[in-house]
Image (cartoon, rainbow, N blue to C red):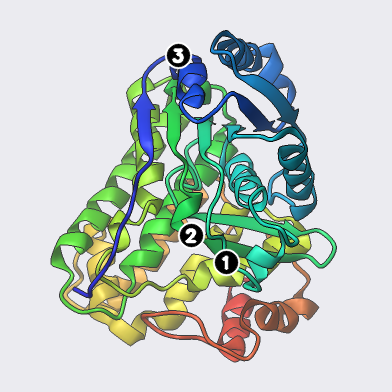
Amino acid sequence: MDNFQLYTPTELILEPGAENRIGSMARRYGTRALLVHYGVPFLYESGLHRRVTDALRRAGVEVEELSGVQPNPTIGLARTGVEIAKKHGIEVVLGIGGGSVIDTVKAIAAGALYEGDLWDLYTGRAQPESALPCGIVMTTASTGSEGSNGSVMTNEATHEKRDVMSDCLRPSFVLINPELTYTLPPFQTACGVADMISHVMERYFTATADTVLVDALAEAAIRSMITLGKRVIGEPRDYNARAELMVASILAHNGLLGIGRSQDWSCHVMGAPISGVYNAPHAATLTALIPAWMDFVLKSDTPRFARFAKNALGVDDTGDDLRTARAGAEALRALYREWNMPLTLSALGVEKSRLGELARMAVGGGTVGSICPVGAKEIEAILAAAY
């Protein structure tokens, strides 16, 4: 195990009607709030928007709103939020939604205290040193942004998708009501579970030796996510399964399952330009890429891939690590297929003629990865295999 530092200050509250606590929770941090959300009909028709805004006003919190967040959230809308925050002296930024809303909330919270252009924080020209406190009403189990120290934004002008990481971006509190996820479409639910599984995998495939405890935690997390995912896809109103998946989303990405080890993140880096250029669902890029990446790199540490196949995916031990490792990649494809997730880049509308360009957009002239570093040439081969 390597040395590490982990800071996870986010307060989590899980209960039916948790969203009704937002007024008292937000009031801890100020009386002027910016509320960020998608602005979709469900928000109003379900009464969720009214419950949240009523709770805030009862607590004496003045509310400005920013709606229109989209999947693969854009820097343009976040810049608008920063302008609102600065104009109205916003003291706390709140969000109702999933990963796109939460990433936008974090962007605004950091940008409100930064004097330059917000995109600077995502290109590395500057680092966020402070941010306004954030609070989230969680409506889906997916990206884990509600518990992480990161935010991902797409620059709609250049189609670049970049992230920024800083502990000042961790939300102050998250309100979790599993009942809010009952009406999610099966595809969106499957995307969420696939995404959280990928977050554990990116940490599991490491070059760090002797990580017994965290390996076992990661394997158990993935087994649980698969079991719970199948339950909620079969029975969308299973309260306990929905609750456990919402907690799993946080645990998958708050840093706990990556302590003491190098991490990979190849598939996320490869998927970023695909989402940026084609506006493809983030999780769909991963289900197309991860099995192809496994096939390409599994010989770099065949015993670890075989262990993953057996302990995380339930593959039978064939007595040959390479055969077992390959069976693991096929088992993951079968799971994605069962959940009607895309298995190829062509299904996402990616043009074959642009694979080399997408590979270079991902890493430039560098490499990414821990268990098997890959550069643009290798990434292009993986994209071709996933096509």
Return the residue nearer the eye: 341 or 69: 69
The residue beneath circle 3 is 17
The kind of residue tagged 1 is: Gln
Task: Determine whether the residue tagged by mark 2 lies in a helix, strand or loop.
Answer: loop
Q: Residue at (50%, 47%) from the top-left corner?
A: 145
The residue beneath circle 2 is 166
Image location (x, y in percent) of residue 338: 48, 46
Image location (x, y in percent) of residue 209: 20, 79
Position of 11 compared to 282: left or right? left
Q: Residue at (72%, 26%) from the top-left corner?
A: 64
Return the residue nearer the eye: 270 or 118: 118
Tag 2–tag 1 contact (CB < 8 Å): yes
The kind of residue tagged 3 is: Gly
Task: Determine whether the residue tagged by mark 1 lies in a helix, strand or loop.
Answer: loop
Sequence-first tag of 1 and 3: 3
Image location (x, y in percent) of residue 185: 59, 31
Sequence-first tag of 2 and 1: 1
The kind of residue tagged 2 is: Ser
Sequence-first tag of 3 and 2: 3
Q: Residue at (52%, 40%) from the top-left corner?
A: 133
Q: Nearer the viewer, mark 3 or mark 2?
A: 2
Residue 257: name its quadrant: bottom left
Does 383 sit above or below residue 240? Answer: below
Residue 192 seen by the camera: yes
Q: Nearer the viewer, mark 1 or mark 3?
A: 1
Does 332 sit above or below residue 240? Answer: below
Q: Quadrant of the C terminus?
A: bottom right
Image location (x, y in percent) of residue 331: 38, 59
The numbered disc on residue 127 is: 1
Residue 102: name its quadrant: top right
The numbered disc on residue 335 is: none
